Image (cartoon, rainbow, N blue to C red):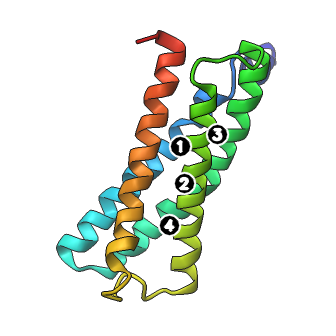
Amino acid sequence: MDVINRIITALTVTHPLHPMIVHFPIALTGAAAFFILLALWKRNALLEQAAFANIALASVSTLAAAVTGMLDNLSTYDGEAPNAGAKIALAALLLIVTTVTAIMRLRNPKLFETSASKPWYVAAYFLSFGLAAVLGFLGGVILYGF
């Protein structure tokens, strides 16, 4: 029982939550971009559905990463983490892009097949991954410096 208590304490008290949560939006936006690229290449609706599922999950996980990031910034850095303002702005943009992409696709399941909106839809996946990658880099700067 002592081992379980130590694990729970490590996860909830000792170790900041943000570094554990932040990997989800990075991985999910990367997987979404990969699947949308495969869907374009193979012209496969099932691969596009996988991309959509990943971008929808990325939206939820981005919100979780943002909340834990702000809480960890307050508790660990007293609100003065390096690049905190830029990270908040980019995280908000990532949340908007992933959420809008997921909602638009949810409302229009044929969005990937529509030629007029397809380039914007696909671009949103790569923009999401780019934003997540920049946010990951800025997080690394907080921990390790340049």
- What label sits on residue 65 in the rendered view? 3
- What label sits on residue 24 in the rendered view? 1
Q: Is residue 14 visible?
A: no
The answer to which of 109 and 117 lies nearer the viewer is 117
- What label sits on residue 53 in the rendered view? 4
Residue of label 2: 58
- CA separation, marks 1 and 4? 13 Å
Choose the circle earlier in sequence order: 2 or 3.
Answer: 2
The answer to the question of whether label 2 and label 1 lie on touching residues, with beta carbons closer than 8 A, is yes
Whole-percent x, y for residue 139 in the image: 52, 25
In front of the other: label 3 or label 4?
A: 3
The answer to the question of whether label 3 and label 1 lie on touching residues, with beta carbons closer than 8 A, is yes
In the picture, measured across the screen, residue 30 lies left or right of residue 26, that is: left
Choose the circle earlier in sequence order: 4 or 2.
Answer: 4
- Residue at screen point 54% across, 51% down: 94
Q: Is residue 96 visible?
A: yes
Whole-percent x, y for residue 86 in the image: 57, 33
The answer to which of 15 and 68 lies nearer the viewer is 68
- CA separation, marks 3 and 4? 18 Å
Three-letter code for the amino acid on which mark 2 is drawn = Ala
- CA separation, marks 4 and 2? 9 Å
In front of the other: label 3 or label 1?
A: 3
